Image (spheres, rainbow, N blue to C red):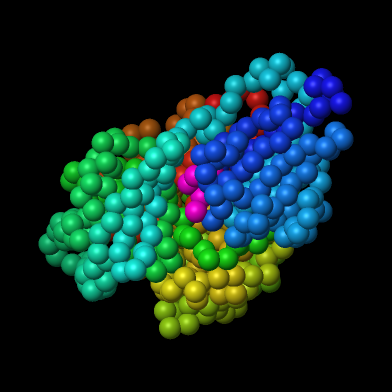
Amino acid sequence: MSNLQKPTLHLLVETGPHRGLEISCTETQLRIGRAPSNGLCLSADTTVSQEHALLYCAQGQWFVEDLKSRNGVVVEDSGVMKRISTAAVLKEGSRFHLGSTRLAVSFDLWRYETRTEPVAAETTEARLVLQIRLESDHLKYRFSGQSPLSTQYSMPFASQMAKGIEQRLDVLVGLANVQMRGNAEEELREIGKMIAAHLVPARVTEKLAEVKGGPLVIVHDSELLGIPWELAALEGESWCERFALARQVVLEDISLRGTAPRAEGRKRLLMVCNPTGDLVDAQAEAEGLLSQLSPHEPWLDIEFLAGPRVTTERLLREMNGADLVYYVGHGVFTPESPDQSGWVLHDGHLSLSYFRNLAAAPRMVFSNACDSARESAQPKAAYGLAQNVGMASRFLLAGVDAYLGALWPIHAESAASFASEFLHSLFGSCGVGFQPASGPQAGSLHHKIGRPLGEAVRLARHASRTDAQESELVWASYVLYGDPLLRLGGPRRTGACK
């Protein structure tokens, strides 16, 4: 077969630390793995083996083969996901999983010669990835990059100090939520200093200080879920203030996540508000946000459920295939039985076990509820596909690409204000947008592009910190899981909108 007839393989990384990376292969084979010697190096994904998979072309057809990797290769075929034991054919539109990384396949005889449209902005932005592992009572830190050499920084794990930090934080936010007098933020800063001093090697802090901002992904073990890494001190700021920060949790087993086909050009937002009827201020804020979004974003389909309409059957049905589910209501976290955690709906308690059966998980869930980011840390051996340790992990295992929740109880009015700032930053288009609900330019129209997910959270933190009372710590309570460069704002398109 001549070179002109051989199809060029094109891969797009859709999930994982390397999301947005694109590669075209004009040769007859391509190796994928964490080792730098691979044609496609996924060094930041710890669920990928050193040499994980081989893609090769034979008689005009591309195949994928598992190289005896730890987590195997899972291929999607007509909505069914199957771990392969022999070489599998790759077709136009095929998707396959290597650990937490999902790759989309396309073919093009003339991709380099004819492609003239600019690359989308999110595919060119760089993520800083910091891996934190717990091994033999030591914390081991490593920055992931493209260099063939990477330094590891280690320190003894001060487990009692970690527990003390969590307990001190619980006391602080408990007092702050009953309007504690005095500077609660000063106490929060002290907790951040303790994290940096006792749980982070000095050299890691120095290297982070060299970076002035941008997206940062923390990849950590499940035993470290309870540590509020977002609050770690760095030159008078916390990590979550300096960076567009997100987390990724390392699983021992591959997460077989289902994905839903999504229509081009439109997106769907499901707003779920005040199922129990007692969060009047939060519902008023959500209704105001709805009135701003609806007339100015014609590409956005919005479904608004509130009060008696928020039943278990209706909510689970409407969640399927949504781009974003925004829930504002009461949350429940039960550390002794985390699978019973969940949301309080009009017809009763919706536990996490229900989310296992979602036919097509939302792309993102924003759970603006008390304790909705709380997780029960467990040993690696106990943390797998069969169970979860909190609401965030349950949704991630169900297939969402990102999850945002709160670590502690938060005031309804402050939580609604944070959500308004976040959604205004996240949603936008290449045409007309809108200004925040408060401020000198409230309600005025302007041209706006939706921000990446991590940056939208960071901007909402800063706005909430500026507006909040001295005792309120809502800006520091949110934890984001997923890719900070994920974009939901604006219609899906492949043109020159950037």
> Going by the picture, which residue comes out furthest to the bottom?
336
Q: Which of 155 and 324 is in front in this view?
A: 155
Q: Is 43 part of what is drawn in magenta? A: yes
- Residue 378 seen in the figure: yes
Q: Which of 127 and 464 is in front in this view?
A: 127
Which quadrant does the N terminus fall into?
top right
Check the image and report above or below for 300 versus 249.
above
Horizontally, residue 428 falls left or right of residue 379, namely right
Q: Residue at x 63, y 73 (%)?
A: 354
Snapshot quadrant of residue 191: bottom left
> Going by the picture, which residue comes out furthest to the left?
182
- Residue 95's x, y, as percent? 72, 47
Snapshot quadrant of residue 360: bottom right
Q: Magenta residues?
A: 42-46
Check the image and report above or below for 340 versus 208.
below
Q: Residue at x 38, y 43 (%)?
A: 150
